[in-house]
Amino acid sequence: MLNIPCVIFAGGKSSRMGEDKALLPFASFDTLTEFQYFRLSKIFTHVYISCKSATKFSFNANYIEDKLSQNIFAPTLAFISAFEQLENDSFFAISVDSPFIDEKTILQLISADSTIQDATVAKTEQGMQPLCGIYHRSLLPAFKKMLKEENHKLSFLLKNSKTSYVTFKNDNTFLNLNHPHEYQKALTLITS
């Protein structure tokens, strides 16, 4: 089991999906969030769910609710809330809509991480995967500044910080469930 905390980001707006993807049924679970929480709890000692409100979920878990504006659906606020609640110097961040990121991928990122970095993030041919990586507390001031300036682009933050990238093959491991057709593809993959 990995001692670094894992934070599942499940507070997005899901505008491209047309409904809250965190609440979509997945595999044998009532929600995609519960699926992610259950499987990642087999890898990490401590798993948290970052969200606007825990009341939308019907299962027991460790929740990190956004303490500030409920009108911001960017991960900037979620990172601040996570660092303010957790005492750790770093945590592993993963999006709720990335159900195929496996233990091997996670271990590669953790092995590549170092305390001299601000972040260690996955990268594929399509570009960086900002919600699959390790973030260090050294980034908290930058996140607060971005929130104040209403700049919510993680790519901007990572390009202007000490970020290490680990390159992976662009396969189904990094399939994001942003659109209904991607969700349908994921349902097919999880049953095969």
Image: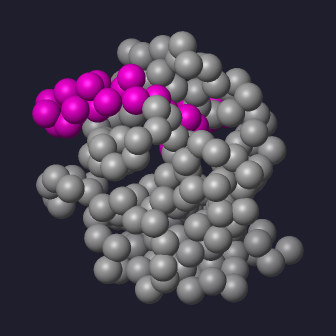
Give above or below for 118 relative to 33.
Answer: above
**Residue at x 52% of width, y 40% of height:** 91
Viewed as shown, does residue 51 lie left or right of 90? left
Q: Identify which residue, 60 or 35, lies in the foreground.
A: 60
The answer to whether one can see residue 1 in this image is: yes
Q: Quadrant of the C terminus?
A: bottom right
Magenta-highlighted residues = 123-151
**Residue at x 57% of width, y 37% of height:** 133
Q: How many badges with numbers are in the image?
A: 0
Reply yes or no: does residue 93 show up in magenta. no
Image coordinates for residue 40, horizontal then vertical, percent: 66, 60
Q: Identify which residue, 2 or 133, lies in the foreground.
A: 2
**Residue at x 37% of width, y 26% of height:** 139
The answer to whether one can see residue 74 in this image is: no
Image coordinates for residue 158, horizontal then vertical, percent: 44, 24
Q: Identify which residue, 4 or 152, lies in the foreground.
A: 4
Which of the 4 image quarters holds residue 107? Answer: top right
Which of the 4 image quarters holds residue 58? Answer: bottom left
